Amino acid sequence: RTDDLAVAAVLAAVACVSSLLLLWMELDANLSNDSWYGSMGLPRLHYDQIVTSIYLKISISDFLTLFAGRTGHKPFFAFAPSKVLLFGAIGSLFISTCVATFWPKSSPDHVNSMGLWYTPDGSSEPSYKFKLMPLFVWAYCITWWFIQDVVKVWTYMLLDKYDIFGYRTLLDVAPGSDDDAAAAKNGDKAALLNDGEKSRQGSTYGTGTVQH
């Protein structure tokens, strides 16, 4: 459905913007003494560590995007995820965080990288700042996750209010109805809306109430 693709695009756009913003802040800190990054007391990362920090950021935000998208038009806390999803996320994110934190200085696939735990050679920054960097990346991702979820809910509200992509029309279709399926296929909105009132009362189609 087109409306699902639109919401997916919005979720992806927020995640992409947050990644690019973090990358810009980290690069800018190496070029300017008056950067946002430095004003927050964060250390100037070596370029190898910038690669690692973006890896960790994307690993975290991609899973958080999944948790935002699974609840449909409702907030991410509307209902609990399944145990398979929850424990799978915990295990994967734990491994990703450990890799990003303790990865030795190396060049896998000819890409220089180094764990966030280590203090780069020649750096005058206190070592504890580098050791706290994984926590900053986590806090950054969670902050953007909240923003992403709010934007998602607003997107659904706009889709419903203005019936963009026929979202409200399809929402009112009683699931499992052959007549409604035929009407939807033929673009007969009048036929669909005739059943709208009764399906609006009890239908959970499109509401995101099905747990995954």
Image (spheres, helix red, strand yellow):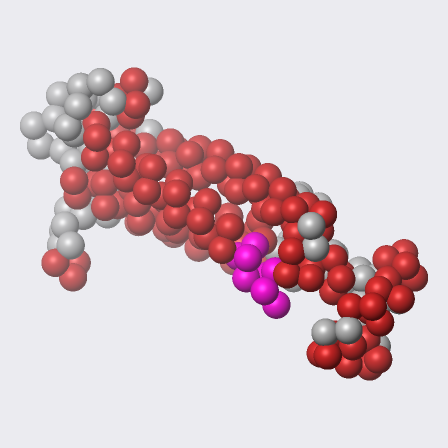
Viewer-proximal residue among 110 and 151: 151
Q: Indicate the position of residue 141 as horizontal and vertical percent values.
A: 44, 39
- Give the quarter of the image for residue 208: bottom right
- Give the quarter of the image for residue 85: bottom right
Stretch of the chain drawn in magenta: 1-8
In the picture, the quarter occupied by the N terminus is: bottom right
Instruction: Judge whether residue 161 is colored magenta.
Output: no
At x 18% / y 19%, what residue is drawn? 33
Q: Indicate the position of residue 186 as horizontal and vertical percent values.
A: 73, 79
Q: How many marks?
A: 0
In the displayed structure, does residue 89 sit left or right of residue 160?
Answer: left
Instruction: Judge whether residue 3 is colored magenta.
Output: yes
- Residue 210 seen in the current view: no
Q: Indicate the position of residue 76 as horizontal and vertical percent values.
A: 63, 45
Q: Is residue 39 above or below residue 121?
A: above
Question: Of helix, strand and loop, which mostly describes the magenta segment?
Answer: helix
At x 82% / y 81%, what residue is drawn? 178
In the displayed structure, does residue 204 sit left or right of residue 138?
Answer: right
At x 18% / y 48%, what residue is drawn? 113
Viewer-proximal residue among 155 and 77: 155
Q: Indicate the position of residue 105 as horizontal and vertical percent values.
A: 15, 46
In the displayed structure, does residue 164 sit left or right of residue 175?
Answer: left
In the displayed structure, does residue 12 sit left or right of residue 120?
Answer: right
Question: Which residue in the rendered view is the most extreme toward the left?
Answer: 122
In the picture, the quarter occupied by the C terminus is: bottom right
- Residue 4 seen in the current view: yes
